[in-house]
Amino acid sequence: MQSDFGPQPLDTLMTRLGVTSADLVKASTKQLTFKMVQKGRKGRRLTANAQSKILEAFQTLKPTETFTLKDFFNY
């Protein structure tokens, strides 16, 4: 099973919207860690639980935009 998928859309989206890893960790109410965010940005496979934590943090930060997991991950 492949575990490294290269830079993910999450990284591009965060850069484009000016969102830092610290912003996501602070916005999360579900114990999102810097390590999870970094793994997600670099393309390491995250569990469904970690992916949903990133999605929820993004929705908290940008409530006017609609995101799905497909917006962040291409695996």
Image: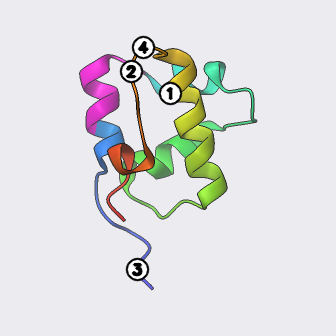
Q: Residue at x 37, y 65 (%)?
A: 75
Question: Compared with residue 14, is residue 41 higher up or lower down, i.e. above or below?
Answer: below
Image coordinates for residue 26, horizontal then vertical, percent: 64, 19
Q: Is residue 29 left or right of residue 66?
A: right
The alpha-carbon separation of the residues under discs 1 and 3 comes to 26 Å
Mark-to-mark CA distance, 1 and 4: 11 Å
Q: Amino acid at mark 4?
A: Thr
Give the residues in magenta. 12-19
Amino acid carrying label 2: it is Glu
**Quick one: label 1 or label 2, which is nearer the N terminus?**
1
| Residue annotated with mark 2 | 65
Circles 4 and 2 in contact, beta carbons < 8 Å: yes
Contact between labelled residues 2 and 1, with CB atoms less than 8 Å apart: no
Q: Residue flagged by tag 1: what amino acid is it?
A: Phe
Residue 38, how many percent across, how many down? 48, 44
Q: Which residue, given by chain and number where applicable, does mark 4 sit on?
A: 64
What element does badge 4 sit on?
loop
Q: Which residue is mark 1?
A: 58
Q: Looking at the magenta stretch, what is its main secondary structure?
A: helix
Q: Secondary structure at mark 3?
A: loop
User: In this rendering, would 8 be left or right of 23?
Assistant: left
Residue reaching furthest to the bottom: 1
Q: Give the residue at mark 3.
A: 2
Query: Residue at image x 63%, y 41%?
Result: 53
User: What residue lies at 59% left-to-right and 37% top-to-bottom?
Assistant: 34
